[in-house]
Image (cartoon, helix red, strand yellow):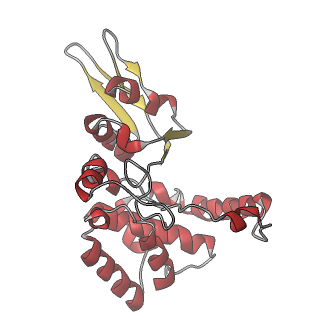
Amino acid sequence: MSDAGLIGGGAGTPRPGEVSLAHNGVLFLDELPEFARNVLEMLRQPLEDRLVTLARSNMTLSFPASFILICALNPCPCGFFSDATRECRCTPAIIQRYMGKLSGPLLDRIDLHIEVPAVPYRELREKSGGMTSSEIRQRVERTRAIQQQRGFYNAHMPSRAVRKLCELDEAGERTLEMAVRRLGLSARAHDRILKVARTIADLDQKEQVSAKHLAEAVQYRGLDRHYWS
């Protein structure tokens, strides 16, 4: 996909791209590292501002782009890196080059990085006793209602509200400090972790963000730069 197809533009009068067509919805990008790096980098503005601005010599147009971004990718070109049952034939240089298309600033703007390992056959076939879709929906709606009472959802939490609404106890401060040092997190990733931890606490119906909530949020940063070093 070209940058104009994803972000918008084109010859003549600029037209909205996929990020604007997904406004108030979901944009799913499969095989993320297969996109050109310069195209992926153009996602940074809409993810940050929820808006796309296209400047031309005779006009400047803005398109709305508030969407939920979901991406999928293999851990390496062959897909078997870290697989316990199949051998990966990619060299470290190949894996580094493959994942190098995902820059740190782009990953900083994605809240959750979750590794999904292959499911063993027995687990695939067994009947799960987990929550039903209806129960999950009720839990999500209850959590959204908590956030609506604050005047915004956690993903859109203003920077000035982060310290107030994501206040940590002593154990939480130690957990966050350790994560920032070990993962080399940026200030933006630091705030993203706090917002995710706030959401986990809301799901748990807790007023205070605890070290437990923060530790879970840190676990969702699996694609940060040092993971692939």
Q: Nearer the viewer, residue 35 or 49?
A: 35
> At 40% across and 60% down in the image, what residue appears?
81
Residue 47 in picture, x, y percent from top left: 38, 45
Q: Is residue 193 visible?
A: yes
The quarter of the displayed image where residue 25 is located: top right
Q: Nearer the viewer, residue 179 or 141?
A: 179
Query: Along the horizontal axis of the image, is 170 left or right of 70?
Result: left
> At 36% across and 44% down in the image, what residue appears?
33
Q: Nearer the viewer, residue 202 or 161?
A: 202
> At 30% across and 81% down in the image, what residue appears?
177
Q: Is residue 161 visible?
A: no
Quadrant placement of the N terminus? top left
Query: Along the horizontal axis of the image, is 30 left or right of 97?
Result: right
Residue 223 in picture, x, y percent from top left: 37, 61
Quadrant placement of the C terminus? bottom left
The quarter of the displayed image where residue 165 is located: bottom left
